[in-house]
Image (cartoon, grey):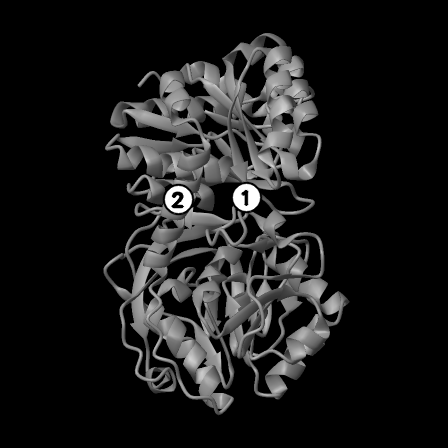
Amino acid sequence: MIQGTGSGAGKSLLVTALCRIFKDSRLNVAPFKAQNMALNSYITLKGGEIGRAQALQAEAAKIKPTVDMNPILLKASGEAGSQVIIHGKVHSIMKAREYYAFKKEAWDAVKASFDRLSKKHGLIIMEGAGSPAEINLMDVDIVNMSIAKHAKAPVILVGDIDKGGVFASLYGTVKLLSKDSRHIKAYVINKFRGDLSILKPGLEMIHDKTGKPVIGVLPYINNIDLPEEDGLALCHGSQFTVHGSREIKIVVVRLQYISNFTDFDPFMYEPDVEIIYSRNTAEIENADMVIIPGSKNTVKDLMFLKEIALDKSIKKAYAKGIQIMGMCGGYQMLGKKIYDPHGIESPYKEVDGLGLLNIETTFKKEKTTCQVEGEVNGEWVNRLMGVNEKLKGYEIHMGISKGDIGLFKVRRLSSNSSVVTRHSSLILDGSINGNCWGTYIHGIFENDSFRRGIINSIREQRELSPIDSTIKYSKMKEKAIDNLADIVKQNLDMDSINRIIGL
């Protein structure tokens, strides 16, 4: 089990790297995180919703993601609390006190998933959450030491030296854990920059003080080029630049409750694209494409855009002919109305959208979660310069939209919801109005020809020659996983890891 001295220490990526390392050693390995709190999620083949990080870890292990890899997913929804997803399906919305009172049921779900997973795989690389030494929460812990003890898993503790105070964090964690610290077998220091010889005395001292060795010092890695787990990656500033200046500039509106922003990672690899997450009016009004991403609270984020007048900037961009795109919640915001008769997201029964798409959305009590495949419908194929590849992606949304819909023909392949009744039947998805369009299909930009078609349509509008890009996103991501695994392998004492595991 990989635990951390705090959030952002590097647990997720270390698990990803270890999954690939052990898979390459021909072990039947799988990832596991008992409870994840994240707004980036993924839909399994059977329609279950799990954390995006566990889907990436499964990819590193070269296996299909399942709900047992992340039995509990918490998605913060604002003042209402968090949406609690158990075994891939929405259970309820709970505030913190309600969820902690729910511990027994949650713990039963965690144990059931781990036990099923352990029967199928020879090695499980587990991930903790936050810190195992949150002394006010130890009695309700189901994701750190409790599951480590249930699984009889040796623990490696990761500390982030880039934040400062790494030795205090390691030492303090061990001391606060008291007897439970016996499960920690070694430390890893992450995000180190500088001369390792200067650090070595500290490595020896922490060993002397706690009796536990440091078995690796991982370097700070720039441009790791893998999906981030959550919105912390977007920092706390006004914008987050993924690439330097390029010919085509895409601005993703940085919402308060932004979800699944990894949808736009494929643009990072395109040689002519700069992608920025921003709330800056000048950035939005001078972009080549503006994307309104998904949101865990569509109504609140819509009202937030109006409060800070970004709705006016988006409309100005539309009037200038800039391409406007809405993904999922952003798609709903671009419509004329959002209805919430059951109070799913807010006390408002009806809210005006931005009005750029001729659709209206009604929130339902049940969530649609499914993988999909489809194709571009109608004349838009010509606009995208003949794109006709089979599109793949997935849906995660509470609302149903009606109106001028038909941008894509879609077949739902799986579902965890009774909303989807006939998986084999074609349905219509998405809407377009001039230079504004939207869809419910997460992952649509992972389709290489479609992504390049969108970019080239913008290039044509800018009177730039189209580029016949050979970028294959899936291969680039595989290469990034391999690169990460190589870095970890080079800087971690793998013999010590094998001894800790018992290999």
Considering depth in this image, is 404 or 172 the residue closer to the camera? 172
Q: Position of residue 230 (x, y in %)?
A: 56, 47
**Residue topped by disc 2:** 55
Q: Position of residue 83 (x, y in %)?
A: 55, 42
The label on residue 88 is none
Farthest bottom residue in view: 463
Q: Position of residue 168 (x, y in %)?
A: 70, 24
Q: Position of residue 109 (x, y in %)?
A: 43, 26
At horizontal 49% and vertical 89% (from top left) the residue drawn is 461
Considering depth in this image, is 29 or 333 the residue closer to the camera? 29
Against 293, is 224 above or below? above
At horizontal 28% and vertical 55% (from top left) the residue drawn is 413
Considering depth in this image, is 421 or 28 the residue closer to the camera? 28
Three-letter code for the amino acid on which mark 2 is drawn: Ala
At horizontal 43% and vertical 72% (from top left) the residue drawn is 430
Against 317, is 96 above or below? above
Give the class, few, some or many, for how many residues have Cα within 10 Å of label 2's Cα (few <14, many ≥20): many
Residue 486, quarter of the rendered image: top left
Image quarter (top left, top right, bottom left or bottom right) of the C terminus: top left
Residue 150 in view: yes
Give the distance between the C-alpha atoms of the residues marked 2 and 1, in whole angstroms: 13 Å
Image quarter (top left, top right, bottom left or bottom right) of the N terminus: top left
The label on residue 38 is 1
- Could you tell me which secondary element the residue under label 2 belongs to? helix
Against 476, is 313 above or below? below
Three-letter code for the amino acid on which mark 1 is drawn: Ala
Give the class, few, some or many, for how many residues have Cα within 10 Å of label 1's Cα (few <14, many ≥20): many
414 sits left or right of 334 in the view: left
Point out the tag, 2 or 1, that comes first from the N-terminus: 1
